[in-house]
Each structure stands twice: as C-alpha cells, then as structure tokens.
Image (cartoon, helix red, strand yellow):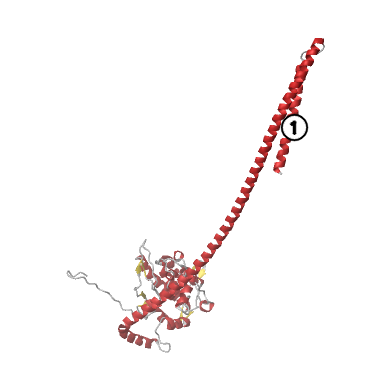
C-alpha cells in the first residue's frame, strides 16, 4: 500500500484450526477409499491453482496439508508453507536440491532441471501413504531413501494394499514415474478415473471397492513415528493442548532450530552429492574400460592391415621382378630372331643366286618355264618365314612359363 510517503505491505492471515490431515485421519477407526479420493481431489485442486500460475510448491508433504475445520465430515484442505515455492519460467532452467527427502522427485535428487512435474511425484507419495500407512521410498538413512527414489524402487505390498482398488494403484503408478515428461500433469491427474469416478460407479471397466474400509492402524503408526508430534500414549485432546504450549515457545527456539536444520540439510545435501558423484565416477570408469577395449581392437585391426600391406608390397615386387625377367627374355628372343632373320636372308640370297644361274642355263636349252623361278622363290620364302615365326613363339611361351614358376 502506498501512503504517499512510504511503501508498506499488508499480510493477510487465515486461521487453520483443524490440524494436519494425517493427524485427523489417524484418529479415525477406518477410512474408505472414497473419502481418500475426496481428500486427494482437494490437494489436486490446490496444486492445480498453483500450476495455472506457473508456480511449483516443491515441498508437498503431510505436514503441509492442513484442515480448516475438522468438525466437518470431509473437512476443507489448505496447503501451507510456500518457503520453497518457485515460479517456473519458460526457457529458464531451474535446479536445486531441497525439500523433504521422503517426498522429493528424482530430478531434485539428481540435480536436474526442475518443473511443475515435481509436485505430482510428491502427490503420488502422499497418496501411497494415505492408502497404506507405509512410505514407498523411506529407508533407514537419508542416503538410502534418496537411492530408493532415484531407482524408483517400490511395490504394492499385499499386506498394505489388500483393500485398495486397481484404479488407485494405477493412479499412483502414473505419478511415480522417473521421467517428468512421462508423469501425469495436474490436469491429467484430475481427469484420472480414480479421481473422477464416484462411489458405486463403473469407469472404463473398473469398479471401486465397496464396503471395504481401509485400515488406519498403519497410517496412525506412520503419523506418530514420522510426521506428527502426537505423544504415543496420549489422547488427541492432550496433544492439542500440548501444541498450544509448543507454539508459545517456538519463537524462542526458531533461530537455533533454523540454524540446526540448515546444517543438517546442508550436510545431507553434501552426502547426496557425494553419492551422486560416486555413481557418476563408477559409470565413467566403466565407459573408460569400454573405450579402452575398442581402442585395443582398432590397434589389432591396424596391425593386421599393415601386415597385409607389407605382403602386398612383396607381391608387387615379385611381379615386378617377373616382368623384368620376361622383358629380358623378350629382348634375347628378339636378338635371336634378328640373327636368324639375317642368316635366313643370306641363305635366301645364296639360293636366289644359285637359282638364277640355274634358270639361265635352263633357258638356253629351252625347257624351263620363265615363271617357275618366281613361284619357287615365293613358296620358299613363306616356308622359311613360317618356320622362324613358330620357333620364335615357342621360345617366347617357354620363357613365360619359366618366369611364372
């Protein structure tokens, strides 16, 4: 409010006198699944309002689910404690490690980008506890709890879920999904058959369990042990008086308690980060061994190819030597051919001279035809040339055979 000179803010408060939802349910002898559905529906409506404003609560748990007035059969629910709430902006990555370990989503544990889907995981855990009185991921230590969350390690124990409908289990399964993109959105959760169906009606082939109230003993034990300050051996009325006293002295202890809680939370976050680092380190070592093995295989293949290259080079050299031998043989045969050709030419010249004298004498006597000498000379030349050529080919083939051997 602007008064003209100074700026001031007005804070509005509303009294929530009904206490925590789980404390209220723990006092009941039994709880029907229809009643549980109505409470979950109210939680979804509250979260839906936040999500339409792009605001994530990030700390949904039983302690932050309060009743306006517990005297009503189905009291109205109010969500409280928005200390960790954050506005999710499009295109802006938001990471943090915070919240109550038992209810945080895997993306918070793994320090991954966060969104509205983290609240749906918390609602899945709350629904599981509300219907069974058992926590799906709670371990002996904080580290064990976080490890169960990242592994999504839970089951529907028959001891706790014997009276729970299949639709309720399906609703929980679709919320406790590790990948936020595959998890139900708040609108999809509100449209789920378990939330939309009413008592005694069939929805998509399923029928809600009738006249089978859920046991609240385990829920009572869980509430006293984990999320309530109700003294085990006292009545709820005594607890309310005790709560008033606690509220009066809580102011004095707030600073010390906040400091101690911050220290414990910081130490737990450090332990969680160390655990995540150890897991990542083990994964990187495994990947290193795999890459090392692949490099070893590549080196082996390289040596193998190098050896083949050397053998190929030797074969090329051998072929070159054989070609050199063939060339030498060819040159020798060519020289031999030229020599034979020269000798043959000399022999032919001698025969021609002889035949010339012979034809000259025959012509004087008049009984030898003039063309006989030409024909004889032509046939003789063909015979001699064919003989020399066949001898040359035979020698060349012999040389090639020896070279290849």
Q: Which residue, given by chain and number where applicable, does mark 1 sit on? A: 391
Horizontal side, residue 233 vs residue 286: left or right: left
CA neighbours of label 1 inside 10 A, class few (<14), some (14 to 19), many (20+) = few
For the C terminus, the image quarter is top right
Q: Position of residue 309 (x, y in %)?
A: 60, 50
For the N terminus, the image quarter is bottom left
Q: Position of residue 211 (x, y in %)?
A: 50, 78
Tell me if residue 217 comes above or below residue 153 in the rendering.
below
Q: Nearer the viewer, residue 202 or 65?
A: 65
Q: Does residue 217 appear in the picture of this structure?
A: yes
Horizontal side, residue 44 vs residue 352: left or right: left
Residue at the far bottom: name it.
233
Q: Residue at x 67, y 38 (%)?
A: 328
Q: Nearer the viewer, residue 383 or 342?
A: 342
- Could you tell me which secondary element the residue under label 1 belongs to? helix
Place residue 341 in its image quadrant. Answer: top right
Q: How many marks?
A: 1
Horizontal side, residue 284 vs residue 74: left or right: right
Q: Position of residue 196 (x, y in %)?
A: 44, 68
Horizontal side, residue 104 vs residue 297: left or right: left
Tell me if residue 177 comes above or below residue 214 in the rendering.
above
Q: Nearer the viewer, residue 213 or 158?
A: 158
Q: Position of residue 98 (x, y in %)?
A: 39, 73
Q: Does residue 201 appear in the picture of this structure?
A: no
Tell me if residue 325 comes above or below residue 69 in the rendering.
above
């Amino acid at each position: 409010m602007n008064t003209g000179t100074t700026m001031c803010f007005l804070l509005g408060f509303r009294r929530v006198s009904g206490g925590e939802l789980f404390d209220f349910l723990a006092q009941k002898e039994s709880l029907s699944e229809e009643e549980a559905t109505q409470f979950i529906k109210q939680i979804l409506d509250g979260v839906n309002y936040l999500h339409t404003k792009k605001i994530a609560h990030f700390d949904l748990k039983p302690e932050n689910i309060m009743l306006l007035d517990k005297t009503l059969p189905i009291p109205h629910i109010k969500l409280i404690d928005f200390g960790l709430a954050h506005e999710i902006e499009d295109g802006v990555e938001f990471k943090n490690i915070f919240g109550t370990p038992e209810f945080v989503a895997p993306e918070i544990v793994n320090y991954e980008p966060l969104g509205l889907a983290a609240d749906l995981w918390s609602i899945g855990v709350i629904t599981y506890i509300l219907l069974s009185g058992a926590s799906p991921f709670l371990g002996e230590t904080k580290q064990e709890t976080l490890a169960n969350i990242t592994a999504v390690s839970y089951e529907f124990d028959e001891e706790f879920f014997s009276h729970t409908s299949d639709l309720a289990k399906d609703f929980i399964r679709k919320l406790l999904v590790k990948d936020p993109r595959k998890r139900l959105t708040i609108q999809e959760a509100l449209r789920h058959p378990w939330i939309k169906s009413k008592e005694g009606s069939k929805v998509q082939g399923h029928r809600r369990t009738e006249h089978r109230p859920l046991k609240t003993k385990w829920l009572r034990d869980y509430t006293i042990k984990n999320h309530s300050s109700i003294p085990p051996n006292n009545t709820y009325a005594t607890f309310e008086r005790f709560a008033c006293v606690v509220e009066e002295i809580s102011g004095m202890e707030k600073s010390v308690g906040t400091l101690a809680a911050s220290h414990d939370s910081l130490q737990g976050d450090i332990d969680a980060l160390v655990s995540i680092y150890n897991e990542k380190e083990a994964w990187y070592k495994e990947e290193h061994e795999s890459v090392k093995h692949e490099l070893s295989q590549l080196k082996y293949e390289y040596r193998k190819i190098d050896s083949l290259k050397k053998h190929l080079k030797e074969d090329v050299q051998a072929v070159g030597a054989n070609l050199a031998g063939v060339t030498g043989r060819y040159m020798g045969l060519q020289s031999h051919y030229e020599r034979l050709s020269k000798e043959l030419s000399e022999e032919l010249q001698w025969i021609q001279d002889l035949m010339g004298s012979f034809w000259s004498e025959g012509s004087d006597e008049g009984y030898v035809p003039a063309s006989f000498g030409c024909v004889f000379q032509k046939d003789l030349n063909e015979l001699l040339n064919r003989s020399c050529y066949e001898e040359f080919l035979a020698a060349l083939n012999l040389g090639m055979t020896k070279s290849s051997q």
